[in-house]
Image (tube, grey):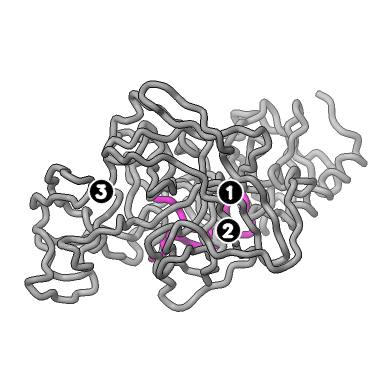
Amino acid sequence: MRYLPMRNIVLSLSFLMTAALHAQPELEAWLVNTDGATGQFWNGNNLVEMQDECDVQLVQYSEDFVYIHANGIPRYPTAPFPDGNPSQATVQDYLFQIPRQPEEGVTGGTATGLGHTGVLINGVVIFNAQDAFSYNNQGVWHQNGGFFENDGFDCAKGHPAMGQYHHHQVPTSFDDSFAPTSDVCEDFPSQALFTVDMGAHSPLIGYAFDGYPIYGPYAFANADGSGGIARMETGWQLRDITVRQTLPDGTELAPNQYGPDVGEMVTPPIPPGAAPVAAVLGAYIEDHEYVAGSGHLDAFNGRFAVTPEYPEGTYAYYATVDEDHNGQYPYFFPAYRGVVETDNFGGGPGPGGGGGTNVTIDEPVETWSGGDVSGVSSLVSGHAGFYAYPNPVRNEVRFAGQLPGTVAVFDALGRCMAQWSSHTLVEGVNLSGWPAGTYCCKDVETGQHTLLILHP
């Protein structure tokens, strides 16, 4: 085995430690199009190349904000939409403004509205659970888009509204589930944004308009980064009801406001001529209630926790799924925990109204082009191939990702403290008795590093 000279190791570790303190996932996470790739869509049995570039086109930033320029077109194939939706993903020319130092908002949060509520790392927007319709158009029992629109999603679980392609739930393909709720992927496959890995912390997949990150459904079991990997269970639960005569807060409705009995056949307003469906429990937003302590997450579908990108911890939302990895209400978040940058919403009424944004850049900005911090902090977060968890750690540490054959561990003085094989990395290493501090875990074959922070 070949090792770096002691001086180089010390300098390398010092540089990594400095970069870790300045990791900037709100700049680094975006999938900027550097190869000119365009979107694709299924037209019959043919995969057609679009004329327009996919992913994010430009990232700019100031001290307080990140500005995202995107077409709103994904790199993964879109269409067809089995409910007959004739629209396709079209260029939206988005400009989003994401706070770099999120602030907690008003007590109870700010409810999300129709339209976009956040943006994924590829520039595609997310919507909340509503589909804009309610039972008898009364605005009392609001349809759950995850139920009523399921048959209109493409393989990547997305669809367009007058060209504005979006996701109401976790952007994984239907066939990434143990019990798919659609067979559209059989003939029109799409890899979607990511694939769920039950053994690793899910990736950072986007940002809400209050600046808090959004993660996939698997994370460290405990908020401090310990306990291994677990599926984040939402605290939103189905109510124990058979008739829809009261709201989740206990409000008793007048008879003319009652919803359909649970299981009753109803005819969706769209698409035209749709066949009646059984209004099962969960078909309406008001079928759900938040039960404190029943899951990992709070009423906003988030929590404060250590993540690979934020080793010191951050508040984050999670795209929740059930045991079969199908999207589970509230899918992303029903309300914002933080102060919302409302210019991200379009011209319509309330949050998310309209398809565009009202963002303008009225301050000096720089263009993000990667650089040293991007390259180094990706090692910290595990994007170099492997990462440690929990991180920070107090006792036992494990590794996940693309595990190297052998890792050498160096302290801040460049001393080799240990060598661990890939088998040991998975099984876990007890660090009891090690001095607190930051260690550099180095793949002895490739030279890639990841940092390990040991708490006292």
The residue identified by callout 3 is 147
Q: Circles 1 and 2: CB distance less than 8 Å?
A: yes
Can I make out residue 258 in this image? Answer: yes
Depth check: 31 or 217 in front? 31
Locate residue 379, reporting x and y percent: 70, 42
Question: Is residue 305 part of the magenta span, yes or no?
Answer: yes
Residue displayed at 70% across by 28% down: 406
Mark 1 → mark 3, Cα distance in angstroms:
29 Å
Say which label, 3 or 2, has the lower sequence index.
2
The residue identified by callout 1 is 70
Depth check: 281 or 152 in front? 152
The image quadrant where one finds the N terminus is top right
Q: Give the range drawn in magenta.
A: 299-320
Furthest toward the top, the residue is 45
Say which amino acid is labelled 2: Phe
Mark 3 → mark 2, Cα distance in angstroms:
29 Å
Residue displayed at 48% across by 61% down: 303
Question: Which type of secondary structure does the marked residue at label 3 adopt?
Answer: helix
Q: Circles 3 and 2: CB distance less than 8 Å?
A: no
Say which label, 1 or 2, has the lower sequence index.
1
Say which label, 1 or 3, has the lower sequence index.
1
Say which amino acid is labelled 1: Ala
The residue identified by callout 2 is 96
Question: Which type of secondary structure does the marked residue at label 2 adopt?
Answer: strand
Mark 1 → mark 2, Cα distance in angstroms:
8 Å
Can I make out residue 437 in this image? Answer: no
In the image, is 160 to the left or to the right of 340? left
Q: For the residue carrying disc 2, how many other residues have a C-alpha within 10 Å: few (<14), some (14-19), or many (20+)?
A: many
Residue displayed at 33% across by 25% down: 186
Locate residue 249, reporting x and y percent: 24, 73
